[in-house]
Image (spheres, rainbow, N blue to C red):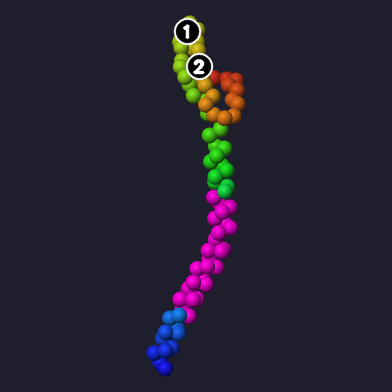
Amino acid sequence: MGKRSYGTFTIISVVLLLVVAVFSGIAIYPWLMNFLSETGIKSAYAPSKIVVIESVKAVQGGFILYVRNVGVSPVTVDRAYV
């Protein structure tokens, strides 16, 4: 009878461990999906405005700067500081 109870305790402990693991996964899943969706949205819109300097020419009295918008959003350059 004593050996039989050791097997029963082992089975009960394995079942209890599985129950804890399943409920932990159920509790963490919504938080993880929310976290991943927020970071995905932020990173998708982050590089929408990108301006690249194509070339610079020095002319008498100043510079001519050629820039290109390689992002997806429209960009307006209203000032440039040297």
Residue 5 image-quadrant placement: bottom left
Q: Quadrant of residue 76?
A: top right
Q: Please, what is the three-letter code of the amino acid marked with disc 2?
A: Tyr
Secondary structure category for the residue under label 2: strand
Q: Which residue is mark 1?
A: 59
The stretch in magenta equals 12-36
Q: In the displayed structure, would residue 13 be above or below residue 67?
A: below
Is residue 81 on the magenta stretch?
no
Q: Residue at x 58, y 58 (%)?
A: 30
Query: Residue 63 in the image: x percent, y percent?
Result: 49, 12
Q: Earlier in the sequence, mark 2 or mark 1?
A: 1
Quarter of the picture holding the N terminus: bottom left
Q: Main secondary structure of the magenta part?
A: helix
Q: Position of residue 24 (x, y in %)?
A: 53, 66
Q: Nearer the viewer, residue 4 or 47?
A: 4
Is residue 29 on the magenta stretch? yes
Q: Residues within 10 Å of mark 1 (few under 14, many from 20)?
A: few
Q: Is residue 42 left or right of residue 58?
A: right
Question: Which residue is at a point 48% across and 73% down the rendered structure image?
Answer: 17
Q: Residue furthest bottom?
A: 1
Q: Give the numbered dot on residue 66.
A: 2
- State the CA–CA distance, disc 2 to disc 1: 13 Å
